[in-house]
Image (cartoon, rainbow, N blue to C red):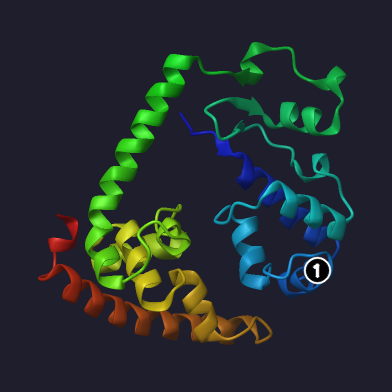
Amino acid sequence: MMLPMQIHELLGQGIRAARLRKGWRQQDAADNFRLYGLPTWRPVAVGQVETGVRKPSIGELLLACAALEVSLADLVPDTEELVDLGTGATMSAAAVKALLSGDFGQFPADPADFTFPGEASIEDMLAQAGAERDRKRQLIQPIIDRSGLDPYGELVHTMFQQPTEAEVHAARRLRVEPVQLRGAAIALWRRNFDAERDARAGDGEAPARTLAARRGHAARAMLTELQTYLTETFGAAGKAHN
């Protein structure tokens, strides 16, 4: 059974669709978002929002809607997938759209369109999430200790965020877990793998083939640097999994 889509992933798809309807590149969107009070939404950030890597706040979503000239309800694409609202409760995309638009006449009455977990389910979900976070904390504790970062600061917090596809691929190449790959990237460069790669590759104004070549070259150099850092941190290859 397919897992529900996260609400920020659903709205990210809607932002991408709205951008394309305007004929904007990600650079164009970033320029317009900046005018509407979103200075950190550079092209890389726009891509992260659209792919669900970055979770925008409700304030950021409203400003993005202003720039795109759409409502929050307009950001909900037509899809048959269930949507996880972040609390364990799920709804169909149609139900989400109805709620955001205030059209309760269109709110689906079929119980299959939404589920609201009971107290026991929520407690179990929180316990599982806590156990997984503790496991990840153990995996990256040597990185945190070596980095000198505030153990409870924002940069360490970002180490626990959902890995990107590039990070998963890079972690597989280095035979470590994605959380360790991201932790090492943040310890080395104070930003995640994708952001460092894109910064080294330059802006998105170059032809697509040139930009892809630059990113590939940057990624290979970064893998070498990460391998050295992880080996120095954990010792011989393979110990990073312990």
- Residue 133, by quadrant, is top left
The answer to whether residue 199 is left or right of residue 95 is left
Q: Amino acid at mark 1?
A: Trp
Q: Residue furthest left?
A: 236
Relative to residue 201, is residue 159 depicted above or below?
Answer: above
Q: Nearer the viewer, residue 39 or 230?
A: 39
Q: Position of residue 120 (x, y in %)?
A: 42, 15
- Identify the residue at image location x=65%, y=87%: 206
- Identify the residue at image location x=74%, y=70%: 30
Relative to residue 77, is residue 228 depicted above or below?
Answer: below
- Identify the residue at image location x=62%, y=15%: 112
Q: Position of residue 197 (x, y in %)?
A: 48, 78
The quarter of the image holding the N terminus is top left
Q: Which residue is mark 1?
A: 24
Mark 1: which secondary structure? Answer: loop
Relative to residue 197, is residue 72 depicted above or below?
Answer: above
Q: Position of residue 138 (x, y in %)?
A: 23, 51
Relative to residue 215, is residue 97 depicted above or below?
Answer: above
- Residue 105, by quadrant, is top right
Q: Nearer the viewer, residue 201 or 64?
A: 64
The answer to whether residue 108 is left or right of residue 185 is right
